[in-house]
Image (cartoon, rainbow, N blue to C red):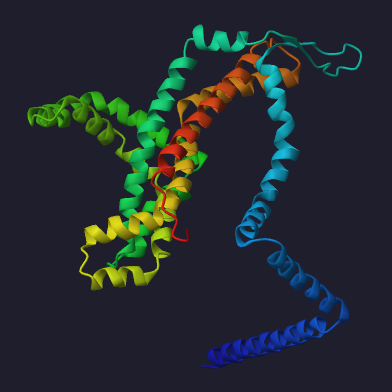
């Protein structure tokens, strides 16, 4: 009992102390706001929005605030990435040679570049053993994965927006792959995939004899292109689920921001859930399709095997370059690979932006 009373008094004293501290901070804040300097600063911050409201239209003010939000990214790109970005253009059209190490000081002299035009690009596209095929495979995989991930994410977001027991737990399950997206988890997944591949030979034949999904669809007189599409989709179920966490969160936030009076008016008019989805929910969240689409394209490309190939060879060339050892003539070739990958990414993103922009509805306009 004495211990309980002691703890009670201690917590009471701590609460009283925090209360006094809060009151003291509030008093200091009030005293500071009454100083001439703070009043002048408040007038300045109040004057700027009023001046903007008088000088610029609503759309221009929106554009200015949007520019201010992306300004840190622009500054960071110019300061950190612009110079390497331009240097890779020079490397991609040059033959890079290592000048070796100064014998007296031991310092690395540097590199020399010889302009060769588009020879690196021609070599990559015509003679390189794996890059062209990897680029095609990554692009095809992206064109397939992006629609599947967006459709799946929107459906799951609609389901998670409804009320049912354990909704928060289910939301957490779908977002867990994003939280666990780390090198350790990737290594564990790769090890698991290798073990599964080793065991596949002993089990695949048995289950294949029991049930084959594609044979079942073919026997049901479903067209071959649909069988191939559904079979590929079934093979990609794990990837679709694991890559959809952020997109589900984006669509869920969009659905929850839809004005409630639109749903109430639709229910009064006797609209079905199907009609409510296609006439209200989908149009209202359609602007977020652009955001989720661009994110999905970039994420899919960065997860492709092609980017791993470029990173392995590029970093190997960098290590040779920094150590002053070995031949770094392939450094320009891998800079060309990076640029081809960048150009293909821009084209794919542009295609999806063009397609998705046709489905966008803006409520304010």
Residue 153, given in percent of the width and then of the height, sits at: 35, 49
> What residue lies at 74% left-to-right and 73% top-to-bottom?
46
Image point (86%, 17%), residue name: 106
Where, by quadrant of the figure, is residue 99 drawn?
Answer: top right
Q: Which residue is found at the position 62% from the left and 22% from the top?
A: 314
Decide which of 306, 224 is in the foreground and name it: 224
Toward the viewer: 219 or 363? 363
Q: To which quarter of the image does residue 94 belong?
A: top right
User: Is 187 placed above or below 67 here?
Assistant: above
Residue 294 location in percent, x, y? 48, 41
Above or below residue 260? Residue 280 is: above
Q: How far from the left and from the top, in percent, is residue 18? A: 67, 85
Q: Residue at x 20, y 69 (%)?
A: 270
Q: Position of residue 300 (x, y in %)?
A: 45, 35
Q: Tell which residue pokes out farthest to the right in this image.
A: 104
Q: Nearer the viewer, residue 252 or 20?
A: 252
**Lateral position of residue 21 relative to residue 190, left or right:** right
Q: Is residue 32 left or right of residue 300?
A: right
Image vertical order of residue 31 relative to residue 329, above or below? below
Quadrant of residue 90 within the rendered picture = top right
Horizontal relation, residue 44 to residue 74: left or right: right
Can residue 149 be seen?
yes
Looking at the rendered structure, the number of numbered marks drawn on it comes to: 0
Camera-side residue of 58 and 132: 58
Is any part of residue 176 visible from this angle? no
Q: Is residue 356 left or right of residue 71?
A: left
């Amino acid at each position: 009992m004495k211990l309980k009373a002691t703890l009670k008094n201690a917590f009471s004293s701590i609460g009283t102390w925090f209360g006094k501290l809060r009151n003291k901070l509030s008093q200091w804040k009030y005293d500071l706001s009454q100083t001439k300097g703070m009043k002048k600063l408040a007038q300045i911050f109040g004057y700027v929005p009023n001046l903007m409201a008088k000088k610029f239209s609503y759309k221009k003010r929106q554009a200015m605030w949007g520019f201010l939000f992306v300004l840190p990214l622009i500054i960071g790109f110019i300061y950190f990435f612009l110079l390497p970005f331009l240097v890779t253009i020079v490397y991609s059209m040059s033959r890079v040679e290592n000048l070796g190490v100064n014998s007296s000081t031991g310092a690395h002299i540097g590199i020399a570049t010889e302009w060769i035009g588009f020879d690196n690009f021609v070599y990559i596209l015509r003679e390189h053993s794996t890059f062209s095929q990897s680029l095609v495979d990554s692009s095809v995989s992206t064109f397939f994965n992006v629609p599947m991930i967006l459709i799946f994410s929107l459906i799951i977001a609609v389901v998670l927006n409804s009320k049912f027991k354990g909704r928060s737990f289910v939301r957490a399950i779908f977002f867990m792959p994003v939280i666990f997206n780390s090198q350790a988890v990737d290594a564990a997944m790769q090890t698991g995939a290798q073990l599964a591949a080793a065991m596949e030979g002993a089990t695949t034949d048995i289950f294949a004899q029991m049930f084959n999904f594609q044979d079942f669809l073919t026997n049901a007189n479903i067209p071959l292109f649909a069988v191939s599409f559904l079979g590929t989709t079934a093979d990609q179920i794990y990837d679709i689920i694991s890559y959809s966490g952020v997109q589900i969160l984006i669509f869920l936030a969009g659905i929850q921001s839809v004005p409630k009076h639109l749903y109430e008016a639709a229910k009064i008019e006797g609209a079905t859930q199907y009609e409510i989805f296609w006439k209200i929910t989908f149009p209202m969240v359609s602007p977020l399709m652009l955001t989720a689409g661009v994110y999905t394209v970039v994420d899919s490309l960065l997860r492709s095997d092609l980017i791993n190939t470029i990173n392995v060879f590029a970093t190997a060339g960098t290590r040779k370059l920094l150590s002053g050892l070995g031949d770094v003539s392939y450094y320009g070739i891998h800079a060309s690979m990076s640029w081809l990958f960048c150009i293909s990414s821009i084209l794919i993103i542009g295609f999806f932006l063009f397609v998705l922009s046709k489905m966008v509805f803006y409520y304010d306009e």
